[in-house]
Amino acid sequence: MSPWSWFLLPTLCLLPTGADPRRGAPASANCELKPQQTELNSFLWTIKRDPPSYFFGTIHVPYTRVWDFIPDNSKEAFQQSSIVYFELDLTDPYTISALTSCQMLPQGENLQDVLPRDIYCRLKRHLEYVKLMMPSWMTPDQRGKGLYADYLFNAIAGNWERKRPIWVMLMVNSLTEVDIKSRGVPVLDLYLAQEAERLRKQTGAVEKVEEQCHPLNGLNFSQVIFALNQTLLQQESLRAGSLQIPYTTEDLIKHYNCGDLSSVIFSHDSSQAEVPNFIKATLPPQERVTAQEIDSYFRQELIYKRNERMGKRVKALLEEFPDKGFFFAFGAGHFMGNNTVLDVLRREGYEREAPNSVLGAHLLVGLRSGSARCGRPSSGSCVGGPLAVSASRAPARKCRPGWRGGAEVSEEAEAATPTAKAAA
C-alpha cells in the first residue's frame, strides 16, 4: 500500500511506489526473514517505571505484510498495557470528517479555477488512465469481498476537483497498482487501534487533526504547483516506462521486517520518513531552490515541531497517570534520526547513561534487539543496539504465534486520510 495516501497518520510515509523493487537492492533489505520469531529485531522502546510503558514504531502498510515479523515482546507489551495512544484517533469519525474538511478548497472553488491549465489537463488525463486501469489492478480476493474498481476509485478520488492541490498531489501518489492491490486490509496502526477497541482498552491521541493537516496547507501556491508538477512528471515517466524508482514500498516492508530502518532508504535522517523529497540533481537551479525550500519547510513543520509536541504530551500523560501502563504507537520515523520523540523525553528528564545502567523510575530505555531470543535471557539484560532493556522489565518472548484477527476498514476512511496514508 502506497505510503502516500494517509500522509500524516504514519511517520514512514511518502516513499514513491508503483515500480518493481530495484534489482540489486541493498543487502540489508535481503535479510533472512524468520516468521518463527526466533530472532527478530523489534521497534519497541520501554519507559522504565512501574508499571512499564512503551513506545512502538509502526509503518503505514497493510498489517498482514508485517505482523508475523513483529516480535512477541511487542505484542505482549500491547496486551499488557491498559492505555493505548496513537498520533491521531483513527477510530473516531470526527478524525475522518475533520481531515476531509481540511483537504477541501474554499467553498465555491474547484481545481480548474486554481491550477494552471496545462497541469489541470495532465492531472485529468492521469486520473482517467488510473480509472481505466484500476479494474485490471484489482485482485480476485478484493472482488470476492465485494470491493470493485468503480467504488474504490470514487471512494479515493471521486471529489478530486474540490481538493486543495497539495492533497491531490498526495492522492495521485496513492493511486498506484501496488496501493490499489492492498486496499481492504487495515494498515498496521489502524489495526492496532481496532484491536485496542476490541479489547476494551482506553485509547487516545497525542495530536489533533488540525496540527497534522494545517502545515500542509501552509505551503505557498508556487511551491504547491511545483510539487504537483513534479509528481505528475514522475507518474507520467512511470507510465511511459522511462523511470524506475530505486526504493519502493516493498523495500520499506522488507527493511521493517528485518528490523533495519536505519538503512540507506532512511539514511539522510527522519525527514525521509515523512515528507516527499523533490530534490534532484537534474533540476534547474531555481527549481532546486524551490525543492530545498519545500524540504526545509516539511522537515521543520511535519517532523521536528511534531516530535517536540508529541514528546511533551507523552511526558504530561506519564506524569498525570503514574500508575498506568501506556503503549504509544507512533510511526517509526518519530524515533529515528535527529530531534526524535525519544530525544524530547530525554531532554525532559527521562535520561539514560550506558546501555545497561538504571537511573531509576524515569530511565528511558529501548529494545531494538536482534539478540533477544524466545524466553527471558539468562543474563542481567538483553542488549541489542544503541539502547537496552532490563530483562526483568522485558516481556517474555514465548515463541508462539502472535494474536491475529480480522478487521475491516472503510475505503472512505482510508481515502479521507491520504497521509494522511502515509507515512507516510
Image (tube, rainbow, N blue to C red):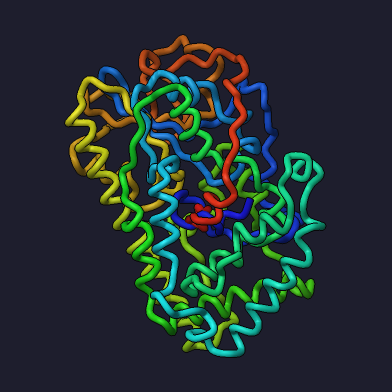
Asked if residue 268 can be seen in this view, the reply is no
Residue reaching furthest front? 108
| Total marks placed | 0
Asked if residue 9 can be seen in this view, the reply is yes
Residue beneath the point at 41% across and 82% down: 221
**x, y (%) of residue 224?**
46, 78
For residue 142, side relative to residue 365 (left or right): right
Along the line of sight, which residue is nearer the eye, 337 or 313?
A: 313
Look at the picture and state if 62 lies above or below 152: above
**x, y (%) of residue 142?**
74, 44
Look at the picture and state if 340 lies above or below 47: below
**x, y (%) of residue 247?**
64, 57
For residue 112, side relative to residue 299 (left or right): right
Along the line of sight, which residue is nearer the eye, 16 or 392?
A: 16
Along the line of sight, which residue is nearer the eye, 7 or 30?
A: 7
Specify the quadrant of the image occupied by residue 382: top left
Look at the picture and state if 77 lies above or below 144: above
**x, y (%) of residue 128?**
72, 73
Residue beneath the point at 78% across and 40% down: 144
Along the line of sight, which residue is nearer the eye, 253 or 217?
A: 217
Residue beneath the point at 78% across and 75% down: 240
Residue beneath the point at 78% across and 55% down: 137
Specify the quadrant of the image occupied by residue 245: bottom right
